[in-house]
Amino acid sequence: MSAMPARPPVQPHPESADVPKPLGSLSASLLARKGDARPAMRPLALGTATVVPVEDDAALVTSVTLATARRIARESATRTRTGKAAFTLRLDSDRHVRLRLASAMTRHSSQYLVTLALDAFLQNLPEVDALVAQLPVTRAPK
């Protein structure tokens, strides 16, 4: 047996140095070969679908009288009107971290802690209660 002659080293083409190489992609089956994992998506089984009769569900729905529909609308409207207002509070990062830690330590929400602090602050301002007493009543208290 004769020894094979050594190949000369491959020289890169001068124009190909500026062209980026295409990125390779790994499919689910290639990734699964690495270990014991199975591909995330299995190939779909080709075949015909089986036709199954569907039962008529329309008989299960009963009609509601107009009075009942109005009562349900009134009840749901009163449940959604909670009398709460949205408010955005902007905090510096130090106060935000302290509020989050206090919330975690006390197992109360940040909103609850801020509401407690606001209530304590407003108790020290009797002028606010005097002004609230002068406001017109917009809804009956619950």
Image (cartoon, grey):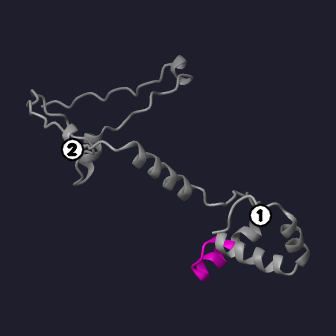
Residue type, label 2: Leu
Check disc 1 and report the residue beneath it: 91
Give the residue number, with chain letter if any, for mark 2: 60
Judge by depth and name the residue closer to the eye, 59 or 5: 59
The quadrant in which residue 52 appears is top left
Circles 2 and 1 in contact, beta carbons < 8 Å: no
Asked whether residue 107 is drawn in magenta, I would say yes
Mark 2 element type: helix
Q: Is residue 24 left or right of residue 50?
A: right
Which element carries disc 1, helix, strand or loop? Answer: loop
Residue furthest to the right: 127
User: Residue 116: which disc?
Assistant: none
Where residue 129 appears, x then y in whole percent?
A: 85, 73
Magenta span includes 9: no
Residue 136 versus residue 17 in the image, above or below: below
Q: Nearer the viewer, residue 1 or 53?
A: 53
Amino acid type at circle 1 is Leu
Mark 2 or mark 1: whose residue is earlier in sequence: 2
Q: Position of residue 71 (x, y in %)?
A: 46, 51
- Res. 36 image quadrant: bottom left
